[in-house]
Image (cartoon, helix red, strand yellow):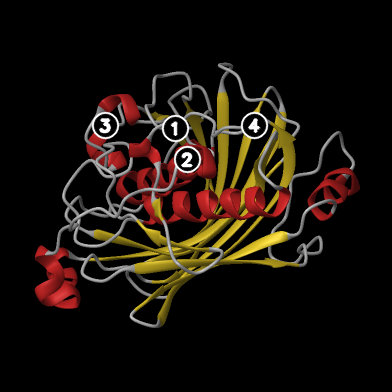
């Protein structure tokens, strides 16, 4: 992208629509501006000030967990459609996603900026490193890999599953067990096994699924692992007066989660990830060791595994801190 005439500054792309964000409502569009800085580096202007429905903080949490996931998703889509010239009929596949936040940063309505750096890994695949910055502070870093396929290729890939749609919904666990407020926000159903829940693919909440899909979206899975981690920690601590604030999440997709069979999410405690082992938290107050102490202190990390028909379909590790309700 060439600089604006006479300024030397990069042109700014604006006017991002719900179609670019793969959402049904313009109010859910979070990317407001994009500048190409050269060498596959980009700066994006973001807006978290609107009424984004479901994307408010979970109980006992600091950050807008779903808003973070949705923001990272929309950054990738904005780059793909506007900078990489990927057509609107293409389908996107998230291969992996990790992010870490500083739990001491309190988001507000002041301007938010993202810095993104892209590394091409194949003709139709890219890895994107993103930092989110507010009030001059980097409070989130992420790394993700996604690819895309043409509509024709996707139809071949999905075959008869292309017309799949969500079936009857399992009865949800109580919202308080997952850190949510209403039943249509809960994506976990009960199980007879300890520390195990059934994934509810579609709760009817349009913030989770707002257009027809033929498999469980990654956004639903991300919310499910956070709810399962919250529920697991609640069970271990006895529940009363304790919230769970995720500060780092790693998600790896093995295959599509389908609608035609139950998907079970199993949780277990694992040792906290050491600093630099896949999840890198942004330094706080110029001291990278301060946040590392927060990330490795207190409760252990929670490993979540999704299984469908006996096969692993996704894996995740969520690390967090205990906070008062």
Which mark is first along the chain, 3 or 1?
3
Spatial separation of the CA atoms under disc 1 and disc 3: 18 Å
Q: Position of residue 175 (x, y in %)?
A: 46, 39
Residue topped by disc 1: 55
Residue nearest the viewer, comparing 227 with 146:
227
Residue 81 in sight: yes
Checking the image for residue 17, the label placed there is 3
Q: Helix, strand, or loop for circle 4?
A: loop
Q: Position of residue 129 (x, y in %)?
A: 58, 53
Spatial separation of the CA atoms under disc 2 and disc 1: 5 Å
Residue nearest the viewer, comparing 182 with 85:
182
Label 2–label 4 contact, CB within 8 A: no
Looking at the rendered image, the disc whose residue lies closer to the viewer, 3 or 2, is 2
Label 3–label 4 contact, CB within 8 A: no
Which mark is first along the chain, 4 or 3?
3
Which mark is first along the chain, 1 or 4?
1
Looking at the rendered image, the disc whose residue lies closer to the viewer, 3 or 4, is 4
Spatial separation of the CA atoms under disc 3 and disc 2: 20 Å
Label 4–label 1 contact, CB within 8 A: no
Residue topped by disc 2: 66
């Amino acid at each position: 992208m060439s600089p604006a005439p006479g300024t030397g500054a990069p042109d700014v792309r604006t006017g991002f629509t719900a179609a670019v964000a793969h959402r049904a409502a313009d109010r859910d569009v979070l990317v407001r501006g994009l500048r190409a800085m050269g060498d596959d580096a980009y700066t994006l202007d973001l807006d978290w000030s609107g009424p984004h429905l479901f994307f408010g903080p979970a109980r006992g949490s600091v950050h807008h967990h779903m808003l973070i996931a949705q923001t990272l998703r929309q950054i990738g889509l904005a780059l793909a459609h506007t900078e990489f010239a990927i057509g609107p009929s293409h389908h996107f596949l998230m291969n992996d996603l990790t992010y870490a936040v500083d739990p001491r940063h309190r988001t507000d309505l002041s301007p938010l900026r993202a810095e993104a750096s892209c590394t091409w890994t194949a003709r139709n695949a890219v890895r994107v490193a993103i930092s989110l910055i507010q009030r001059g502070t980097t409070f989130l870093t992420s790394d993700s890999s996604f690819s895309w396929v043409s509509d024709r290729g996707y139809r071949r890939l999905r075959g008869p599953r292309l017309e799949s749609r969500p079936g009857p919904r399992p009865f949800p666990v109580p919202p308080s067990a997952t850190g949510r407020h209403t039943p249509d926000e809960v994506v976990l159903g009960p199980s007879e096994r300890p520390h195990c829940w059934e994934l509810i693919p579609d709760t009817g909440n349009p913030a989770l699924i707002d257009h027809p899909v033929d498999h469980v979206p990654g956004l639903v899975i991300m919310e499910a692992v956070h709810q399962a981690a919250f529920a697991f920690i609640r069970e271990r601590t006895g529940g009363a007066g304790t919230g769970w604030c995720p500060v780092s999440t790693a998600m790896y997709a093995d295959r599509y989660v389908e609608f035609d069979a139950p998907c079970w999410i199993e949780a277990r405690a694992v040792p906290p990830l050491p600093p630099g082992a896949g999840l890198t938290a942004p330094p706080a107050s110029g001291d990278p060791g301060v946040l590392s102490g927060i990330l490795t202190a207190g409760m252990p990390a929670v490993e979540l595994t999704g299984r469908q028909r006996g096969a692993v379909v996704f894996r995740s590790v969520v690390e967090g801190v205990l906070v008062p309700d």
